Image: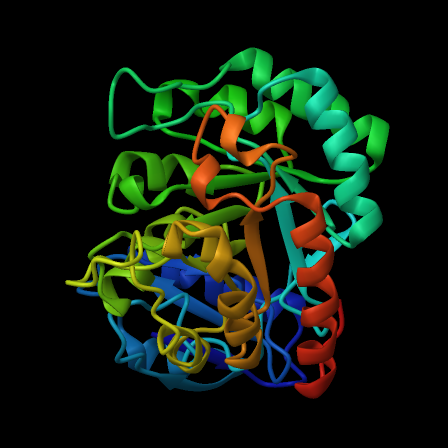
Amino acid sequence: MLIIMDDSATQKEIKRVTKLIQKMGGDVHHLSNNTANSMSISGNHSGLNPEKIAKMPGVKNINDVKKPYKLGSREMKSGDTVVKVGKVTIGGKKLAIIAGSCAVETVEGTNEGGRLLKLLGANLLRGGAYKPRTSPYSFQGLGKRGLEILADARELIDIPVVSEAVDTESFDLVEEYVDLIQIGARNMQNYSLLKRAGRSKKPVLLKRGISATINEFLLAAEYIMSEGNYNVILCERGIRTFNEYTRFTLDISSIPELKQQSHLPVLVDPSHASGRRDMIIPLSKASIAAGADGIMVEVHPFPDKALSDGYQSITFEHFSALMKELDTIAKAVGRSI
């Protein structure tokens, strides 16, 4: 349910309506909207009395939101959401470029690599401190030490950092050190983790599950938003199909669909989608042309020696070429990098 207030509604009237809804058992969410003062109601609607709410001073009208994902839908908010991560905005005209190694490996590699990536045009630095790997014998990440290295790099380079929270036990630690918290594809339907992310003050980057539908993806984002954290960024990272030539299949069609159904920003991760460094540039270009708000790519100075996912990481030389290609595409679709 969406409550639209009159343009002339006072803060006192808005507070009275909020208290009435809460007394009826509804959860009230105030989403910033470009067109009107509005508040959405989630939770159990059985105790709500729409007629009584409609008669409250300042209330213009009440709309029933039909989508199962209420808070993230275009019905709830017509304008695009722009999420701020440090000094970087995601969802506006300027594209967000997140780059870095799959896993944090060394202090020198993170600092020198971060400096070069920023110089080449990246505006957020990624790096995994906790790595959920398919095999228990693969490198699992440096844990807290990896987060400390990332945080130090942020101060040295002046760039926001991104890392993944893999469970509720380590969430507090990740939240303490990073600027943007990633929820990976394997955890897209880890509801206790999503709820914990919803109680965080940090923005969240949510990746699509490998077999998730668009509805399931948006409902996962709804779990985060329903807890009060509206700074959610969606990330398409490929889904499992019968294709045997790439690690996953990048669902380009999901980009315009997500932008049509939701007001949340949409990024694309071509590294995990393809698992092939030779496909990073063309898939990135296609993603921006389709309307993505940015990309997230894995970059390593020596991919063949990387401790994690080296086969899908590009070199700094390739990243430089990627940025030049994206500049052309961005200008063609009215964006910038």
Residue 179 position in % (x across, y down): 64, 37
Question: In percent of the image, x 24 and y 45: which residue is there?
Answer: 189
Residue 82 position in % (x across, y down): 63, 65
- Please state which of residues 235 and 120 is positioned toward the viewer in this rendering: 120
When asked about the image quadrant of residue 74, the answer is bottom left
Question: In percent of the image, x 56 and y 80: which residue is there?
Answer: 289
When asked about the image quadrant of residue 238, the answer is bottom left
Instruction: Let me know if residue 52 appears in the view.
Output: yes
- Is residue 326 positioned above or below 178 on the image? below
- Is residue 4 positioned above or below 160 on the image? below
When asked about the image quadrant of residue 44, the answer is bottom left
- Please state which of residues 259 and 132 is positioned toward the viewer in this rendering: 132
Residue 135 position in % (x across, y down): 24, 24
Residue 204 position in % (x across, y down): 51, 46
Question: In percent of the image, x 72 and y 78: which residue is there?
Answer: 328
Viewport quadrant of the N terminus: bottom left
- Is residue 188 positioned above or below 70 on the image? above
Instruction: Let me know if residue 269 appears in the view.
Output: no
Left or right placement of residue 55 versus residue 286 in this view: left
Viewport quadrant of the C terminus: bottom right
Way the structure is coloured: rainbow
Number of labelled discs?
0
- Please state which of residues 120 and 190 is positioned toward the viewer in this rendering: 120
Question: In percent of the image, x 60 and y 32: which residue is there?
Answer: 302
- Is residue 62 positioned above or below 93 on the image? below
